[in-house]
Amino acid sequence: MNTLYITNGDANSVVSEMFESYGMNYEIVNLPANSLKLEEGNVGLYNAIVIENATQNDLAGITEQITNYQKKYKVRAAYLNCEPDLTLGFFNPNKNVRTVSTVLTDKGLELAQKNQMNGKDIQFEIGTCIYNNEKGACDQYSHNEVQIIGDNITPLLKYNDTDTYAGAIVKQQDIESIHFFIPYIDSIVAYFTSHLWISWTNYGIIDGFRRLYFNIQVDDFFIKNLFNYQEGTGFRTSVDDMKGIAKWQKDVVERMPKGSEYKTELALNGIHVLIEANHKQFVATNWTTTPVERSYVKPLTEPGTNRWPTADKVDSDWDVNALKADKLYDYFAQHPETQDDFYWLTHTFSHQNLDMASLNDADMEISLNIKMCDDPYLGMYKRDCFSKHSIVCPEISGLHNGHVLQMFEKNDVKYAVGDTSRGDLSPGNFYLPMVTNTTTSNFDGFIVIPRQPPQIYWDCSTVEQNLEIYKVRYNQEIDWTTHLNNEANLHIKNFLKLRHDPYMFHEGNLRNVDVPEVNIEGVSGKFGLLQQWVERIVAEIKKYMNWPLVSKKMDDLADTYIQRLNQKKCQPQYTLVIDDSSLNINEIKVASTTGECKVPLFAIRNVEFDESTVKEVEQRGVDPATAWIDINNTPKSIKFTKDVKWNDDAYTNTSGSTHMMKYSWKILAITLAVVLLF
């Protein structure tokens, strides 16, 4: 399907981002516009219309066209931060820039619950400012506080200190529209309400995918890190710590929405097994970070560092019995079933910074770690719990070094994580991977997916240490509850945006055996830094959404990014074929514009896909189902098992039903093409 997005092109708008979050097709028309192409012959081109930041004067030349199209095809429209239309029953609008909060009305909460969302008693603060780095000041944004009159208006969002409204649905003369009088800039309320208008305008059938991936990656596993580089402060996770984490994972998943799956992912450094076991250690004479900018693209003519001898001069014939002196290693090596409590991947052998690494250094760092992970040592490399194609690079280094990427390829490593705090490793679209090329890295085709750095610091194993580092970094003191609340308020936005970035933690953050008992959002336990952060984030997510949280090992997570990238490249077209008398959906045709790919079709309504037309259906917990369709340039027909009326969204939240689709044939079609923004 295809959404028409009419906008004034505000650079800070999050509307395009929310379309991208689902992977929907949409086409942008910039204001001012005097006419629109909405049809070809008797075929409607758009199944939904979204208008943002428009005045009534902006719309004067196209309003009649839009309303006639809505009447003919029963298409809904969303008006976002537009000037209120007084002819619809809105009156006495007050345009304001003040800081104010809103709450969902009963009908607003009902609409949220139809989408498996929550929001009860939440105070949604309206965004008023986006910091402009060039100006060194805020770009200010206003909102409208609107009064409502008439039975044709259903209020959704109310300002909490006046009898005015920030959102409503209008049904008037066979024309239906949803209105939110708030700026669609970076804010919880903008992201939350986007899910409401996206589903509502599409009648609950979306050419996209909605999933929360919840991936916690722990770097430096097996390393004993010093706190703030102070001698005598080193902490290394114990066997009991890992038993505690394994047990807690089973407990916390019960506090997650139904259908959730959670495992922590451990990125390990094998040399620290040798160090702990005091066995055949390799000690580098110079292990400092290379003196180049992190974005430095290493020329292939530059050999780079040579901190490792060649493989024939490294004694890596390790004694299995000698390694048993490392109790943490032995716990996992001798009990393969314990490996399955977690996901695993490589973090290189010795944690060498790879920005200037030579071919030999890069090869040794990867190949030796693989050897430690494989038989006869840890014995996990070939198991399902291990991501053999993925890596967390030390200090997120080496991704601009073509020699390193050549050695990754040699060792069958295809994917790495980046760092969203670094522009040089951030894709233009965070729902897609960064793909290296000769300009970025002197290497084509290596996949880098975005990763988030929370403020749980790499060298900390206690709350007190974390707060001490925070004080040094920001020159202010903060209590732990406030710190966790700040983290929750920041990162809930990523989940509302359906961002799939994993989160970065470190070895010491796993500590839990000897920490004090704490209470996090009503849950008590001996929780360490990682556990407390996860508990707080899970509680925050549940305030807004009842969607399953799913952990994937990194190989599988990277595959989802590649699948989305392939979807962009093949430019899928979804065509709704609707009977013009009954308005039943006869079928949905899906085809690619170019090439082959797998694409989603998400049905929130109380429908089921006809299994004879869909090979793969994904459904978790209370979430509706998503059909996954392998397509080429020959249209595939997707149908429902029962009659589904196009313009009837009087559906309820039937938690856990397996959704799919049925159809007959054509009279009126709404063809949805894709705009490729890549």
Image: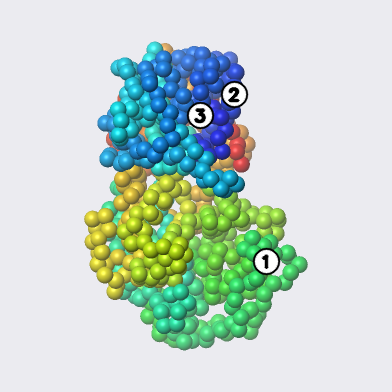
Q: Residue at x 46, y 48 (%)?
A: 499
* Residue neighbourhood size for the residue with mark 3, other residues' Cα within 10 Å, grouped as few (<14), some (14–19), many (≥20): many
Which image quarter: residue 440? bottom right
Residue 674 in sight in this render: no
Residue flagged by tag 2: what amino acid is it?
A: Pro
Q: Nearer the observer, disc 1 or disc 2?
A: 2
**Real-space Cα separation, disc 1 to disc 2, in angstroms:** 50 Å
SS for callout 3: loop
Residue flagged by tag 1: what amino acid is it?
A: His
SS for callout 2: loop
Mark positioned earlier in the residue sequence (1 or 2): 2
Q: Residue at x 46, y 24 (%)?
A: 83
Query: Which of these two is toward me, 482 or 529?
Result: 482
Q: Residue furthest right?
A: 301
Residue at the spot of label 2? 32
Q: Is 301 on the left or on the right of 567, as rendered? A: right
Q: Is 56 on the left or on the right of 114, as rendered? A: right
* Residue neighbourhood size for the residue with mark 1, other residues' Cα within 10 Å, grouped as few (<14), some (14–19), many (≥20): many
Residue at the spot of label 3? 53
